[in-house]
Amino acid sequence: MVNLFKKLSGGALIGIGYLLSPLSWWNDLFFNLPIALVFGYGVTLINSNWFLPGTIVGYWLSNVLGIVMMQFGVMDMFLTEDKPNIRRDLLIGLRGTTFYTLIVSALVYLHSLEMPDFLIGLHP
């Protein structure tokens, strides 16, 4: 029974993590971008000029969360290790999502990727 619960919770982590991860770029509009915008708005409570950097950091964090959730889900479903290497898994997730976020940010900055019109006017 415990093994079944572990596999089901691992599958849920993989599913939710996939929706947040960079692997599902098509879901950014529905998941990652709203999370990033809320984070950006939250950061403006500290300093009103930090909306864009806060949004980028929020986007990066939502992608990191997705990758980490997927990694933990895979470990729950497929690995039989008693002690997973959490530090290694976090570092892998951080590196991959940081690289992805830098690429997306550069593409937006260079206008290769255009921001939707309705997002441009969201800055507080």
Image: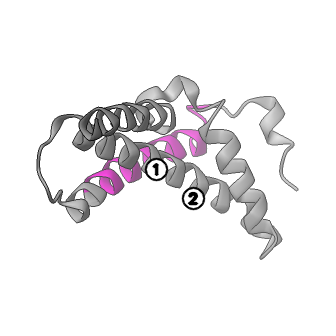
Q: Residue at the left extreme?
A: 81
Circle number at residue 57? 2
Numbered range of the magenta stretch? 92-113
Describe residue 60's horizontal placement relative to residue 92 as left or right: right
- What residue is shown with label 1? 65
Give the x, y percent position of residue 15: 44, 29
Residue 111 x, y percent position in the rendering: 61, 36
What percent of the width, then of the height, locates residue 45? 82, 71
Please determine whether, in this image, residue 25 is positioned above or below residue 90: above
The amino acid type found where label 2 is placed reads Val
Query: What secondary structure is found at the residue carrying circle 2?
Result: helix
Label 1 Cα neighbours within 10 Å, binned few <14 / some 14-19 / many ≥20: many
Q: 46 or 76: nearer the eye?
A: 76
| Label 2: few (<14), some (14–19) or many (≥20) C-alpha neighbours in 10 Å | some
* Helix, strand or loop under label 1: helix
Closer to us: 55 or 110: 55
Judge by depth and name the residue closer to the eye, 22 or 90: 90
Q: Is 111 part of what is drawn in magenta? A: yes
Using the image, tell me which numbered label, if any, was put on residue 86. none
Q: Is residue 108 magenta?
A: yes
Residue at point 51% right, 38% down? Answer: 20
Indicate whether 26 appears above or below 9.
above
